[in-house]
Amino acid sequence: MTEETWDVVIVGAGLSGLSAAQTLRKRNGKLRILILEGKDRVGGRTVTQELLAAHGIDRWDMGGQWVGSTQTYVMDLIQEFGLEVYTQYTTGKKVHHVGGPRAKVRSSSTSIPALSTLVLLDLSQLVWKIDRLSSTVSVEDPMKTPNAQELDSMTLHSYIEKHAWTEEMKEEMGVCSRVVFGMEPNQMSFLYFLMYAAAAGGVLCLLESTPGSAQEFRVKGGTQQLSERLAQQIGWESVRLGKAVTAIWQDAEQAKVMTATHSYLCRAVIVTCPPHLAAKIHYQPALPIQREHLTQNMPVGHLMKFVITYQMAFWREKGFSGEIVARPSADCPLSITFDGTSPSGSAALVGFISGMQAYDWSSREDWALEEYSGGCPVNVMAPGLLTYYHPSLRTPCGRIHWAGTETATQWCGYMDGAIQSGQRAALEVLARLCPFTLTQEEQEAVQAAQNQNHESGPCQHIPSTSHLRRALILTTLIMATAVLLAQPQLCRDWIGQARQVVLRRFALW
Amino acid sequence: MTEETWDVVIVGAGLSGLSAAQTLRKRNGKLRILILEGKDRVGGRTVTQELLAAHGIDRWDMGGQWVGSTQTYVMDLIQEFGLEVYTQYTTGKKVHHVGGPRAKVRSSSTSIPALSTLVLLDLSQLVWKIDRLSSTVSVEDPMKTPNAQELDSMTLHSYIEKHAWTEEMKEEMGVCSRVVFGMEPNQMSFLYFLMYAAAAGGVLCLLESTPGSAQEFRVKGGTQQLSERLAQQIGWESVRLGKAVTAIWQDAEQAKVMTATHSYLCRAVIVTCPPHLAAKIHYQPALPIQREHLTQNMPVGHLMKFVITYQMAFWREKGFSGEIVARPSADCPLSITFDGTSPSGSAALVGFISGMQAYDWSSREDWALEEYSGGCPVNVMAPGLLTYYHPSLRTPCGRIHWAGTETATQWCGYMDGAIQSGQRAALEVLARLCPFTLTQEEQEAVQAAQNQNHESGPCQHIPSTSHLRRALILTTLIMATAVLLAQPQLCRDWIGQARQVVLRRFALW
């Protein structure tokens, strides 16, 4: 077995690993950096492919595709490489088909979703409640959230069952969970959901295509370019493709990163692959039990993406935006579609099959079957995990540092988070190998983050706020709604006023 | 790399793997069977060790130790090898210290736990409710359970929060969850808990030391003897220790099982290691996504066992049974203790540190740090898993068959379940390799089980039963309790009567 010596070995050539390498290289050009990647390409969960379209070959993102103006890390990288973004097309009527196969297909030409007034009120109150809770979450240290243990003890499903008024709203939240995480709401800790929303700036930011939201822009030429440009800047000779890491050993002197055929000695390792894949690497000495249990409890989602090209964007001509939100059924596997027309005008729709439906469709080829992806878009946490094992998400284990979008504190789960996490891990490595390359502030920040991780034990139970108060508010709201429904004529003015409030709230939906 | 050829390769020399080998050998003496084990011993999660005691060296079980009369598979094996069992010592007062460090230390010399009448009533109603739900669970196919999806969407914690009346009872259930699973109640699907209880014959069977319960008997000389005798019967030349399997490849012709240094060709493989370890093996072609997601969602518990030997069993002399149930705190890490005195009279207490407390204690050496255990006593399922991925638990993947106590349908999670699962997997392999060794009935049973697994898609939502009815019953009970508390003198007779009912219900506690 051949053996090479490097300063830093990075496992994974996605945005996180390549960003880590970029930061290391920028700060200290002398560091010998090697990136090992299991796949035969760079980009991780971003990949741009050529498809036949109306006017010949064009390019589409088959993985992560959207960026937004509040995603500062990815926007900076886009600017650095001189790439361009364009706004997601959302003009025109949106189709809504939730509530089962027999439910009415609704469409809305306004900016608010095609829901009844009651469901809109329900949406409003639920988003308000969730956003209020989400604003109390410390993304850096979720154990400090008030009632952390209680929130972590329930699934997202349990919360929705308790707090949504209407069955339609429960279904809407199911759609959101499937589309954002590739997971059903019953597979996820509610606290994890809150943390994820907090890292994005609020729950609506996850769902919308408005300025600052997750689906705001797309990148001309595709997002995989970011990884390709990074690899080019770092030097392709530092990137080895088709080299899956099987084991990482370490001792007081050094670390040894192994593939099936080679081993690489180094002083520090950055592991950037998703938690369930990091768990498959053989570590010696064994990782702390907290870290092992963490990765055993972070299942990856299941979201299948499709792109359909058309001769022309017929929906635009008919006044539709191309957005469909649907409850999947035997006849309709999709959860959501968007206009996917390319900047050069090749008409397309892009859509997702997610969560439970993907179960039936998974005999088709998808990322879940690709060994070094194993699912997408992101790993989430099962209940009861954040409050026990969260510090293990980022705490280095000896010479091993952890990155990847799941470890990010800004836009966790997105390309932006991947870059942030890579840069953060790079600073940790620099603090270890060559602290002189960091400013005093940066050194203190690395130190503070690591101390915080060490200090945080499992969360202690804090009694929850008054159930009575909640029950009173809820009862008042339900009674008000009942009056609304029972006295439609008397209450027409109320509805008009409520609608105005909702319209203002969702002006940019 | 040397290459050998066998008929069947079994991964893991615990009770499951060795029982599979025994069944294969009994049915067809010509089959060439190889068992590969990562550890340097047989027995898996059973291990018997020598400790210094009052009268010299004696032996204690450091892993699985209890068996019960309804555990027919393990009782048969004990009988086959001429081993003896003895009854768990439970005579005398039991100490109960739940409710926080400042709570009163209670003890009870009767057969019912030292709880207040109200908490006993609460225990009674909660166990009644859970048992009634548990009796509706199909262990073979949990998706057929009424309201399966709803039950699988909540954590055990969420159910307890909703249905327990008293804070004390919520704590009691926390203790139960920690002791039975090594897990906090917020880490587990409530449907999984119900299935686990159903496989044991009811929730009290998991908790008690009474006839038919999980803690009924211990095995003289220790439970690891079962695996040692099995290995002896099969032939030690068929068991290779220190051979951790790293990869399993298969094609239309054969399977290839690989360790770091060897590879073994065969016609069928039985993988018996716990799900999170089975997930670390590299499979080619990749396993179906359902199987991958299943093992990503089955975290293993964290239960640390200790044995303390004494000059004499002083607690017996003072009229205590040795049983302590405690709420762990900074001063008291333990959850539960039992009398652990050996059959030859070496005095000892055996106890457990579990769930969240084990977090703090895990820097000590324990099974969680041992690579080929990674935790104990059992893997459980996070919410939202049973109803999606359960069929993957036992469905063979090509030439690979799955065993291990987590796949059992009787006493899942116990030694009994390990043996049952091993025997079941052996029948599957025989049905493939030499169906003539099976009776017509056995062949049909194997076929039926596999068809059932294929037929079951993800569970469909069935609306839950009337919330109103539940609310009415609960309100009535709460009001009755309030009257009981407000009018102690008038209600003395009622209490007496209620106590009689409870005493009859828990006559064997």
Image (cartoon, coloured by chain):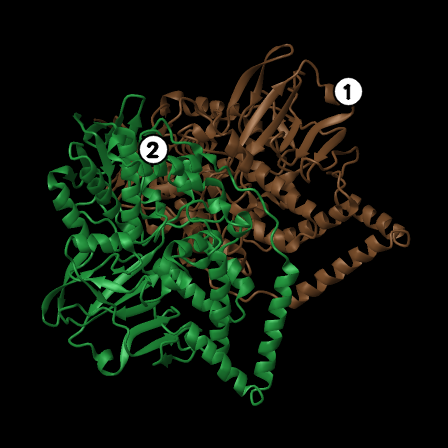
Chain colours: A brown, B green
Quarter holding residue B219: bottom left
Residue A158 placement (x, y as % from top left)? 57, 53
Where is mark 2, residue-wise? A9
The front one of A38 and B23 is B23
Which residue is painted at 47% across and 28% down in the image? A367
Chain name for mark 1: A
Marks 1 and 2, how far apart in space?
A: 52 Å
Image quarter (top left, top right, bottom left or bottom right) of the N terminus of chain B: top left
Element under disc 2: strand
The front one of A451 and B114 is B114
Disc assigned to residue A317: 1
Residue A405 placement (x, y as % from top left)? 48, 38
Label 1 crowd (10 A; few <14 / some 14-19 / many >=20): few
Label 2 crowd (10 A; few <14 / some 14-19 / many >=20): many
* Amino acid residing under circle 1: Glu
The front one of B201 and A56 is B201
Q: In this view of the protein, can residue B38 be seen by the observer? A: no
Using the image, determine if residue B53 lies above or below residue A221: below
Disc assigned to residue B281: none
* Amino acid residing under circle 2: Val
